[in-house]
Amino acid sequence: MNKINLIYKTLLVSFCMLIQQNASYCQSKDKSQNHVSKVWSPDLGNGKYKNPILNADYSDPDAIRVGDDFYLISSSFNHAPGLPLLHSKDLVNWTIINHVLPQQKPYDVFSKVQHGNGVWAPSIRYHNEEFYIYYPDPDFGIYMTKTRDPKGEWSDPVFVFRGQRIDRPLSVLG
């Protein structure tokens, strides 16, 4: 038996032993105990909170208030679905309610990963019972999408301004 086969066989046996030990451990646990994952929550339950409020990377956030509700949008760069949209009633407890972009335009460009490209610093606004999101793509320009229901389907993005290296769309659009 050559050296590589011996190493391979040793690793395989070790791996099998680990799996067997893990299976035995899982079978010996009391089945009546349901394991609940501890998820980050900034809400201390007493009217106070701890930082960070959002324990994740929500780059370039923009938020609005509509009645008693708050909405937050953030950059998603080249990820799809893109433009995560979060909702809160108290600015402490946030929930992802939608991803505004199922795919990113131009579709032919973003059919492949484009590290560092894509949606940067979006802006969300509310006017005449419609939500609007303007988002820049630093290589193409500014796009706009809208909806009446932020949890529902958003319009197909419309190209509204050609330009490069635009960071905040509303600084350009006024």
Image: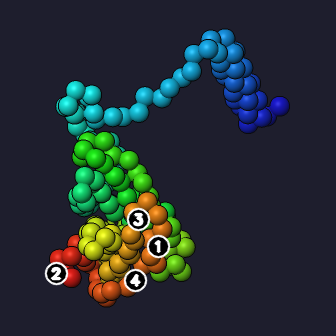
Which mark sits nearer the N-terminus, 2 or 1? 1
Which mark sits nearer the N-terminus, 1 or 4? 1
- In 3D space, how far apart are the residues under numbered discs 1 and 3 (Cα atoms)? 20 Å
Q: Which mark is residue 104?
A: 1
Mark 3: which amino acid? Asp
Residue 167 seen anywhere in this rendered image of the structure: no
Which mark sits nearer the N-terminus, 3 or 4? 3
Q: Which mark is residue 149?
A: 3
Q: Which mark is residue 174?
A: 2
Mark 4: which amino acid? Val
Depth order, front residue of 126/31: 126
Q: Which mark is residue 158?
A: 4
* Colouring chosen for the image of the structure: rainbow
Q: Are the two marked residues, 2 and 1, in contact with CB atoms closer than 8 angstroms?
A: no
Mark 2: which amino acid? Gly
Q: Secondary structure at mark 1?
A: loop
Horizontal side, residue 53 vs residue 80: left or right: left
Please name which of the two marks, 3 or 2, marks the residue nearer to the observer: 3
Residue 133 in the image, given as x and y percentages of width and height: 32, 71
Q: Secondary structure at mark 2?
A: loop
